Amino acid sequence: MNLKNSQWYDIARDTNWTPKYVTEDELFPPQFSDPFGIPTSAWETFDEPFKVTYREYVRTQREKDVGAYSVKAALSRVDFYKSADPGWKALLQMHFGTIPLVEYGSVSAFARITRFGKGPGMRNMATFGTIDEIRHAQIQMLFAYEFLSVDRAFDWAHKAANTNNWVILSEHQCFDDVEHTRDAISAAIMTNFSFEQAFTNLQFVALSADARRYGDFSFSTMLQTIQSDEARHAQIGEPLMKIMIENGKKAEVQKMIDISFWRIWSQFSALSGIAFDYYTPLDKREFSLKEFVHEFVTTQFLRNIEALGLEKPWYWDDYFLPDVDTYHHAQQIGIYMYRDTEWWDPVAGVSHAERDWLEKKYPGWNDTYGRVWDVITDNVKHGRLDRLTPKVLPMMCSMSGFELTGVAGKHWKVEECMLDYEGQRYHFGTPVDKWIFEQDPIRYKGYKGFIDRIVDGTIPPGEGIFDYMSMSPEERGRCGTNFTWADDLKKLA
Amino acid sequence: MANFALVCNYEFDYGMKLLQVDSENTIGEVIQVARDGIAGVFVAEPEPGVTLKLRKYGTTEFLDENLKISETDFKQTETIEIIHVYPKA
């Protein structure tokens, strides 16, 4: 007789045995397991919304892999890539350099939750999460590997994470903080809730939809298989947070959300934002970053937060919402102009038609960021190539590791927050970044960002910058369209 | 020899830049370094008659162009602003 899952699942995964040979604290050291002192009996109430058995898990994962790999086998990815739009190529080059080994890093975070989580259901779900993240790293690495024969940029799927490239340092700075240097509870709230519930929909659902519209079906299918995993283990966060709040730790949970949401937002805005609004070919774009954020973050995520009895992050109205309109536009300018410091070949994405789209989606774009692009366009039109590679370096935020930016042009507003702390000067792009530092200076102090390393001589000037980033001349980004994006603007001149 | 780093907030630009100058450079020379690196690259060249002035970030008073960095209270990576000043009508 086959039992239904509901008849045995809870008791089978209830592995909170009473230890005899070691103490509870030796089995679950508080600094790794629970520095908040929640009673074990409370952790035993952890009730995961997705109840999955190992047998079901393996079957489902196998089906996902079969689906993704058969689409890949049926379609010639190399031929597709060769004829792809330069913007789509840039998107793939950037995605495969930044994402796969972040996924692999998440294996460690999930493994920590698996070992040290005090809720049996939490450990069970994190076990699946650990295996998920291994699969995410492997499948993306394999998909990238296929392009190696036609584009050197995909070497960076493996290489990027082991370099001092400034984009990677920024990723490390964020994910080392939220995933890798926290106890099991904090890492789960910051990763499973803030990261996976708030933002992975953007990277995997929204990007998958764009990929499908563009005709990149294998990339789209691969992203879907990843997101279905993210959706499952994203749900570790909610029951965990309920337990924390019921046991008087609401303020601690709120602070974790406020810190991690902002840190991860900066990453997504700068990298996914430019992919949606500048790299995706115009005729295949359905939604802007702002619209995707409205759908997945300001609606769904906020509803989830409020359902738990938490508040929206304190900076939501004054900093987050304005940032949705601005941050990635500024980052796009820097990423394009400093393209030789990146492994991908960025596109400008500001042809006449693209500018019209940007103005429609972000009213006022022409008077702000458009003013900077006017100068760049004029240089392209007149062949002043020396002005298309800046001689001065950008300044970077001490928290996000991205450029210190703001609103350009007619409504110019570029601000920073400076802090002198124990002999080191820190420059923050927003009061939120500075606030994060001030919540735990011992954690953040002393970190030297990319520009700090140039100023203190760790990174030699000139060519030494590229040596430090392990970037040979052949590996440096070039304009993905070789400046032809300005051709239609030349005709209009 | 560049031994002094300044963070430059150049009016109308999208983001701040790092200027590597010498502590014996004058404010006028710093303005020129900023202009050489940013005007015509990210921001339009100043129109005829417009002058560029420098002030410490968070202040309103422009500094004398002949003042040397070493004569100011600037610390390493001090943030400065370069502002367009238009001729009086």
Image (cartoon, helix red, strand yellow):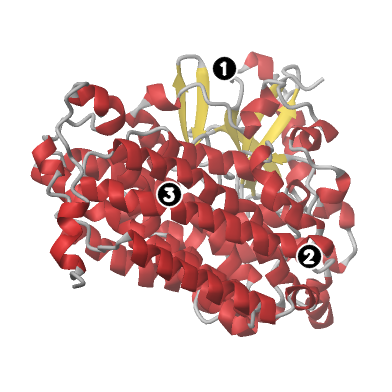
Report whether A296 appears left or right of A120: right
Q: In the rendering, at what x and y percent does residue A261 appear?
A: 37, 50
Question: How crowded is the residue under tag 1: few (<14 C-alpha within 10 Å), some, or many (20+)?
Answer: few
Q: Residue at x 78, y 54 (%)?
A: A477
Residue type at mark 3: give it: Thr
Residue A90 figure quarter: bottom right
Q: In the rendering, at what x and y percent does residue B33 appear?
A: 77, 35
Return the mark for residue A480: 2
Residue A51 figure quarter: bottom left
Instruction: From the viewer's side, name the closer residue of A132 and B7.
Output: A132
Q: Chain of mark 2?
A: A
Distance of mark 1 from mark 3, alpha carbons? 53 Å
Secondary structure beneath dot 1 equals: loop
Distance of mark 3 from mark 2, alpha carbons? 36 Å
Q: Residue at x 57, y 17 (%)?
A: B73
Return the mark for residue A485: none
Q: Which residue is mark 1?
A: B73
Tag 2 and tag 1 share a subunit: no
